Amino acid sequence: MKKLATILLLLPLFASAQWTAASRMSSGKGETIVTNFIRGYVELTNGTRKDGEIQLKVLNGDTVEIRVKPTGGKKEKYPRDQVAKFYGVILLKDVKNDFKKPFKNFHPGKLFLENGDEKTGKIAMRVREADEHDGTKIYGPIGVKYANENDEVTTHMAASNRVVYLIQTINGTDYHYIRVGRQFISVGNPTGRFSYFKNPNPTHAREGTTNLTKVAIQEVGEAIAEEAAEAAAKRSLEESQKRGEDFGQSIGNATVAAMNTANEVNELFTPDEDGAIYFEEYYIVDNEKLTRSIVYKKNVDEVLYSLLEGCGVDDKIPGVTNGIKELTEVMIFLEENVCN
């Protein structure tokens, strides 16, 4: 058993694969799970490789037997200590791909990973299902499904931190998403001088709302944050931005450089038991200078003054901000008037 435990450390974990349980049985030895068959291969310790359909037998969480049905052959069984490696995949043809919402179906796309790697293939956005609701409000997909050149499908959840940015191309139009905490948020104007995306955990509370009950907060779907967390996030922001600069330049999109800063800001905030209703907030990213600003209803003019400093439009800003109803108007004004 000690030898088996050592081998387990060197082989893929059952929890990280694509298998699901086909049957469960309890006995004096514990719980035995037999998985469904999925496409894959088994590589034996003697160097032999078996391609076909793979099934696992799991006893109390340990994979004790790997079964393979080679293409055109009969089922074979191998104890775990005879297997050097095994791999299982779900194929695109076996995945639902006819949702009414196009972004949930597979389209050409690209993933940008936390380690700097890129993956090109077909991608579909994975939304939160009804039985996964945990009482928090989300503003985007919680995962992305990726099909490689062999149509092998893997799913990357936003919470795993593996995928930091992605592009999905639907009918010739590129849709950009950035990971913010446990979700992927749509990025507006991704190829312009200034990009923007929603902050799912806003930091500016509306006056007179700090004593609302927690239930009221959940009903309006607003996030809550403590002042101490906000201060810590600001300090973390500057450090992360410096570390992310090279990565952002390497993939040709400075918005990704702001990803880590946005995530650290959001992930540092914790619920405030007193409760508050917060203004809707967005991050505005300067893709040339690699900086980001938080904008909300009360500070639009302040942000414009800062981003357009020296451009000779200070006298125009008050008139513009007084009439702005949508963030897109702010972005248009920025793009039209930026000078450096």
Image: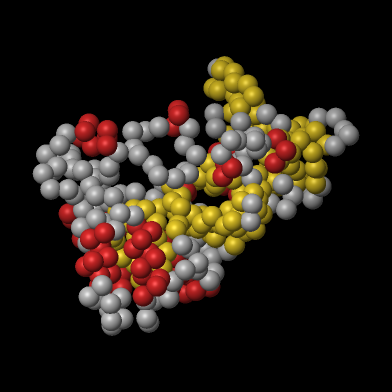
**108 relative to 36, above or below:** below
How many numbered marks are there?
Answer: 0
In-image side of 260 versus 251 (left or right): left
**65 relative to 151, above or below:** above
Q: Quadrant of residue 93?
A: top right
Task: Determine the residue positioned at 60% across, 24% down.
Answer: 32
In-image side of 311 versus 152 (left or right): left
What quarter of the picture does the N terminus occupy? top right
Q: Quadrant of residue 223?
A: top left
What colour scheme has been applied to the protein in the rendered image?
Answer: secondary structure
Outermost residue to the right: 72
Question: Foreground residue, 6 or 226?
Answer: 226
Q: Position of residue 116 (x, y in %)?
A: 54, 65
Question: Foreground residue, 296 or 155?
Answer: 296
Task: Determine the residue positioned at 21% across, 67% down.
Answer: 318
What quarter of the picture does the C terminus occupy? bottom left
Q: Position of residue 139 (x, y in %)?
A: 40, 44
Q: Position of residue 335 (x, y in %)?
A: 40, 71
Question: Foreground residue, 305 or 322?
Answer: 322
In-image side of 150 versus 340 (left or right): right
Task: Determine the residue positioned at 50% across, 67% down.
Answer: 191
In this orientation, does residue 336 appear?
yes
